[in-house]
Amino acid sequence: MKRSRVKRRRTPVGASPGTLIAEPGAGRTELRLTLISPEKCKTIDRAGIADVAAHYDKWPLLWLDCTGLGSVDLIGEIGRIFKLHPLALEDVVNTGQRPKVDFFDDNAYVVLSMIDDIASHRYEQVSIFFGKKYVVTFQERAGDPFDPVRKRIDGPMPNRLRTRGADYLAYALIDAIVDSYFPPVEAASDAVDGIEDEMLNAPQQGQMRQLHELRRTSHGLKGVLWPVRDALAALIRSETPCVTADTKIFLNDTLDHAMRLIELVETQRDTVTGLMEMHLSLSQARTNDIISYLTIVSVIFMPLTFLVGVWGMNFDPDTSPWNMPELRGYYGYPLALLFMAAIALGLVGFFKWKKWL
């Protein structure tokens, strides 16, 4: 499978910092507004910027989920309402950022990579802003692992997502993204185990291609998960008022999940590397065995070919008694076959005695 490579547009050289330029192919920005209080919650699908401005100060907690990064004017307006830093907004629209966390006066900004399509090695950038009373998320395309979080928000009391602050909601979203890596990582580990079992029985040529794909997948996961670990550690160590001490306890659990994923990916990569080496060794050994058998067969037939060549020469025994007198033997043909069979069996016995067979 050919690996897709996406060309990304960057801010032009010399442009003012914070300039927002949509990438080619970016979808139109759609808003989903979730209003949260301990007593109730309300979700507005396909919300407009007027809905955001109208409810901004009227609810204890607000979650604005933005899907699609093509409407830079709308993204800029969202930044003005929530007082988001222009440089952070520039990172939002310039996807492909390394997972990280930045702290500002009124909010924190977290960038993570979410698995979009593991088969094509495509990841999606998710940007999360959270302050005292709001969480704003930006994602490139529709589809995310946040449905369990949405169901928990709509669930009955007691409900920590409705009674705790914005930092706890941000934690829940980050935890959902990290946990979404477990199914593909575990599936890849099962695939590696299956290939290992097959190779021990009979190595096949197609297994090497599968191993290359799995190694490329593990390299991609490693490149994503290590920065995620660093970002989570930075959130836990931070002294910002945006993250409470109680939420840091839950973030520690997410950090443990990230570390476990890293260990699984590292083990998977080492196993795949070992299997590739074993596949090459088994293939080389099989080739050597084939060459050995062909060599033995060639050695057995060499004297037989010599005898057939000698007896096949066109000498007339009537001209001279030295011109192959054995050609006149009554049992010459069967005796010649028996003689050649004896030579072949003798060579086979010699090879077995030498333990070459």
Image (spheres, rainbow, N blue to C red):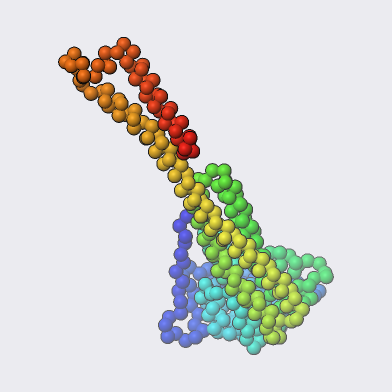
Most extreme residue toward the left is 319
Residue drawn at 56 percent across, 80 percent down: 89
Where residue 349 sits: x, y (%)? 46, 31
- For residue 119, side relative to residue 312 (left or right): right
Q: Can residue 112 be seen in this view?
A: no
Q: How many numbered marks are there?
A: 0
Question: In the rendering, at what x and y percent does residue 134 appear?
Answer: 69, 79
Residue 93 image position (x, y, % from top left): 53, 75
Residue 26 visible (yes or no): yes
Name which quarter of the figure residue 258 lies in. bottom right
Q: Which of 205 and 66 is in front in this view?
A: 205
Q: Which residue lies furthest to the front in this view?
A: 322
Displayed quadrant of residue 340: top left
Residue 52 sits above or below residue 184 on the image? below
Residue 94 pos. (x, y %):
51, 75
Q: In this view, does 239 lie to the left or right of 80?
A: right
Compare residues 209 and 347 and report the one nearer the observer. Answer: 347
Rendering quarter of residue 126 = bottom right
- Residue 75 lies left or right of residue 308; in this view the side is right
**Which residue is at the front of the view, 277 or 87?**
277
**209 vs 136: above or below:** above
Q: Which residue is drawn at 59% across and 53% down?
A: 192
